[in-house]
């Protein structure tokens, strides 16, 4: 029996959207710890970008920050080229950025719908396309991980546009997994449950919840806490690595609850 494959990103050039905080930052740091040759992060906050780049370099990897608003299609289309110019051809992509704005079917403005689809579905499409085209020209394999949500199964009524946009990303994950399989570019998705992130703290405050909302919420969860960025980062790193080389088109429910089952 051969040895179990090691989870390693040695020699890989990894691009992580939303890498200035939360899930994206966790995935970027985990990639560096797994031996990635280079890690590029994107985001809108240049100060946070510089801080994360410094942390990545301290882990021994080359690092670069590309400032971009994923709602801007032209800016998004330039990210892969910017990453390659600084670090070399990207062969691993984590689409971790996302908007979670609230709104029911009766309340959601058209502009909000368009913005959520632009960031949550169109941006991963643009970035996956750009990376895949470059890898095809180079004859190299690659891997993509899309951070989705449990709400892609349908979602709560107050998350109409968010759930729909992430549902589109779930379908895109399977479609591109099949379409890119001949190029040996794997695409998998993580349906993320309730997570403790800076973005979630902002949302909870906007919803009028008290500052100690996390202390109140954690005991109500099956395992006594919310999901943390590092939890997700470990799975994302595995899916990017050759340890998962036979796995593509998977949508993994990363949650404490079991979809379709009721206690």
Image (cartoon, helix red, strand yellow):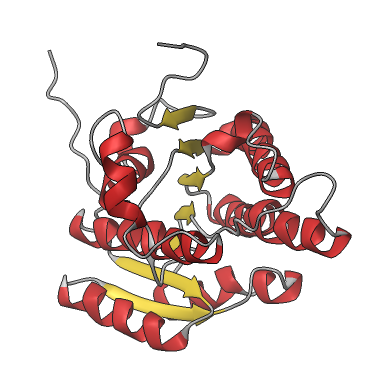
- Residue 221 is situated, as x and y percent measured from the top left of the image, at 32, 34
Quick check: 186 left or right of 178? left
Q: Residue at x 81, y 54 (%)?
A: 108
When the figure is inspected, residue 65 is found, relative to residue 103, above or below; the finding is: below
Left or right: 234 with respect to 207?
left
**Quarter of the rendering containing residue 157:** top right
In this view, 6 is above or below 208: above
Identity of the residue drawn at 59% across and 78% down:
68
Please report the residue visible at 32 percent of the width from the left and 53 percent of the height from the top. Answer: 214
Q: Is residue 117 visible?
A: yes
What quarter of the picture does the N terminus occupy?
Answer: top left
Question: In the image shown, does 143 or 149 lie closer to the viewer?
Answer: 149
Q: What x and y, as percent, mark residue 168?
A: 71, 40
Image quarter hosting the C terminus: top left
Task: Find residue 183 and report its horizontal and vertical position in percent.
Answer: 57, 39
Of 210 and 75, the residue lying toward us: 210
- Residue 13 found in image quarter: bottom left
**As drawn, is 215 to the left or to the right of 152?**
left
């Amino acid at each position: 029996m051969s040895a179990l494959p090691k989870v390693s990103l040695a020699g890989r050039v990894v691009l992580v959207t939303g890498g200035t905080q939360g899930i994206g930052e966790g995935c970027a740091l985990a990639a560096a710890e797994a031996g990635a040759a280079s890690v590029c992060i994107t985001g809108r906050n240049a100060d946070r970008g510089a801080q994360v780049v410094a942390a990545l370099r301290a882990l021994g990897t080359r690092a670069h920050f590309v400032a971009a608003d994923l709602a801007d299609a032209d800016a998004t289309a330039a990210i892969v080229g910017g990453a390659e110019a600084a670090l070399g051809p990207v062969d691993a992509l984590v689409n971790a950025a996302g908007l979670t704005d609230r709104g029911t079917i009766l309340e959601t403005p058209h502009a909000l719908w368009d913005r959520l689809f632009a960031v949550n579905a169109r941006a991963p499409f643009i970035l996956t396309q750009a990376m895949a085209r470059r890898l095809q020209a180079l004859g190299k394999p690659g891997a993509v991980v899309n951070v989705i949500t449990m709400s892609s199964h349908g979602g709560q009524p107050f998350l109409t546009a968010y759930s729909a946009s992430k549902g589109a990303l779930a379908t895109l994950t399977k479609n591109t997994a099949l379409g890119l399989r001949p190029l040996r570019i794997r695409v998998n998705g993580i349906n993320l449950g309730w997570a403790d992130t800076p973005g979630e703290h902002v949302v909870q405050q906007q919803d009028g919840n008290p500052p100690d909302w996390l202390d109140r919420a954690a005991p109500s969860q099956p395992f006594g806490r919310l999901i943390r960025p590092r939890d997700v980062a470990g799975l994302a790193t595995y899916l990017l690595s050759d340890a998962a080389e036979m796995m593509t088109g998977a949508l993994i429910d990363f949650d404490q609850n079991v979809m379709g089952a009721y206690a």
